[in-house]
Structures are given as C-alpha cells and as structure tokens.
C-alpha cells in the first residue's frame, strides 16, 4: 500500500476552485481500488477544503499540518497559543500587513483584503486561491467577527519585505515564515506563519506511522513553496508543471501542468493505477 498526498490549489484543482479534472478523479479512484490511500495535504482549513474532501478521500492534512484526519479519526491537532496570535496580529497590522486568521472551519480576514488583492500582482496559486475564495462561499468572515476560537495559522500579504522585519525579529525562532514564490516584478508578498512544531512534512510522517507504512512508500504532489516540507519528507516527490521553479528543483519528478492532466500522468508514471 502506498500513501499518496495531494496538495489542493494548483495541484488537484485550479487555484481557488473545487472541481478536479476528470482525469485526476479517475486516477484517484483507480489508485484507491488498488489498495492505496489518497490524502489531501493542504494549507486550507477543513471548511475551505470540504467541497473537495467530500469527493471521497481517505483522510486530510489540513491547515499546513496542524490538523490531521485519518478516515474519521483525528490523529493530530495543534492550535496556536492565544497570546502568540494576539501579539502577531497586533504587530502585523501596525506594519500594514494584511492578515487572515485560520481556525478549523473558518477564515477571518481583514475587511479591506479584497481591495488589496485586486491590486496584487503576485502570480502564484495561493494569491489566486484567495482571490477566488473571497468571491465565493468558502467560510471567510470579517476579522471583526473573529470569536476567539482556536486558531492554527496566519496568512499574510503585504507589498514590501520590510513590513515583516519586526515580526520576524520577535517570532522567527518559533514560527516559519513560508513565503510564496512571486514573479520578478510582482508587488505582493504572500505566505503563512506556521508554528515550527508542525508542517506538512511532519504530518506525512504522522500519517505513515499511524498506518505502519514506511516513509519510502509515501508520495507527495505539490506546486507551491508551502508544499516544500511535504516534498522533502515523502519517499517520492512530484511537482506540477505549473509549479514554483524552486519546488521543481527539489522534486523527484516534474509533471505536466494541472490543466494538461498532469496528476493523472503522475499516477501512471509511478504505477499507482
């Protein structure tokens, strides 16, 4: 049995959408019928991932590794410290950084985030995911309505690296600042603040241990820099053709683009179907 881990945005579906190509769904079903287990492995929370998750997966690594379900069983759950969250949001806002707070089921975003994204020129799957998410019903609420429920990570967006200097000086020891690849003249930095106690790679190891599967029998598919730890942890790694250049350089295989049936090609290449 192989354990297969699929990023969502830019890997399984077009960024911000919820409909995988028919070829990808067919490949996933064939792999499952051969006895393999297929997990989602995403930065999305459960609420945002639900439209895809309900298509029939064997589990999910959500919130960049902070929340992991194997079937119906919760096997990992690691929210942020409340005091960290409050202080991080305070500093980031003081320095003009746009933020979202990610809870298990909901996302709370700055009220003017949509206006910022309309002007953003980042050209990566995560920026596009947020553009699309703000246009649809994916559980995004105004920051003013945040109810204090457990938070797992913060998404950040700004125009200059200098806006993150104070936050990094205070918190980089404990939090990984996962910044997405942007085109040369892009005017938007975007990424995530993820506590160093977890990441997608560690979550893959947790799932493998749960099932008693050696890490060599794990396979990860991704496209952006928040997939790096998953790519590095898995026994076999694949980057989509539409993915970040830096991730391609770290991966065992570079597949065709998502739109060109790249995922199905990867399943065939690795003899999963």
Image (spheres, grey):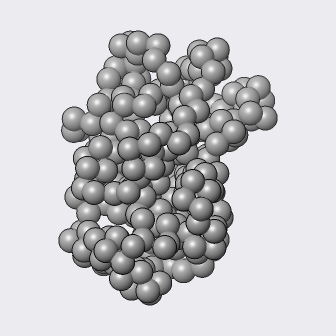
Q: Position of residue 46 (x, y in %)?
A: 37, 39
Q: Is residue 233 left or right of residue 222?
A: right
Closer to the camera, 75 or 201? 75
Q: Residue at x 34, y 70 (%)?
A: 32
Q: Is residue 272 placed above or below 74 in the rendered structure?
A: below
Q: Residue at x 39, y 24 (%)?
A: 108
Q: Residue at x 27, y 57 (%)?
A: 56
Q: Position of residue 77 (x, y in %)?
A: 54, 34
Q: Is residue 25 left or right of residue 214?
A: left
Q: Which image quarter: residue 236?
A: bottom right
Q: Is residue 54 left or right of residue 82?
A: left
Q: Residue at x 69, y 39 (%)?
A: 197
Residue 257 seen in the figure = no
Q: Position of residue 19 (x, y in %)?
A: 22, 58
Image quarter (top left, top right, bottom left or bottom right) of the C terminus: bottom left
Closer to the camera, 160 or 42? 42
Q: Is residue 193 placed above or below 143 in the rendered structure?
A: below
Q: Is residue 252 placed above or below 204 in the rendered structure?
A: below
Q: Is residue 64 placed above or below 264 in the rendered structure?
A: above
Residue 233 seen in the figure = yes
């Amino acid at each position: 049995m192989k354990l297969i881990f699929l990023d969502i945005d830019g890997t399984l579906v077009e960024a911000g959408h919820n409909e995988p190509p028919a070829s990808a769904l067919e490949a996933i079903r064939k792999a499952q019928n051969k006895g393999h287990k297929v997990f989602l492995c995403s930065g999305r929370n459960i609420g945002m991932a639900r439209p895809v998750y309900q298509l029939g997966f064997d589990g999910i690594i959500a919130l960049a590794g902070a929340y992991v379900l194997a079937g119906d069983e919760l096997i990992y759950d690691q929210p942020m410290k409340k005091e960290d969250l409050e202080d991080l949001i305070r500093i980031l806002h003081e320095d003009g950084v746009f933020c979202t707070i990610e809870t298990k089921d909901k996302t709370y975003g700055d009220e003017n985030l949509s206006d910022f994204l309309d002007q953003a020129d980042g050209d990566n799957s995560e920026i596009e995911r947020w553009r699309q998410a703000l246009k649809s019903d994916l559980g995004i609420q105004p920051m003013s309505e945040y109810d204090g429920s457990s938070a797992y990570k913060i998404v950040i967006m700004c125009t200059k690296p200098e806006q993150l200097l104070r936050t990094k000086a205070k918190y980089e020891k404990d939090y990984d600042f996962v910044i997405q690849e942007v085109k040369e003249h892009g005017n938007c930095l975007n990424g995530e603040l993820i506590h160093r106690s977890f990441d997608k790679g560690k979550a893959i190891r947790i799932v493998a241990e749960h099932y008693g599967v050696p890490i060599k029998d794990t396979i990860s598919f991704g496209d952006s820099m928040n997939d790096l730890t998953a790519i590095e942890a898995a026994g076999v790694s694949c980057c989509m053709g539409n993915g970040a250049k830096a991730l391609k350089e770290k991966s065992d295989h570079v597949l065709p683009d998502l739109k060109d049936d790249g995922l199905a090609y990867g399943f065939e290449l690795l003899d999963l179907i």
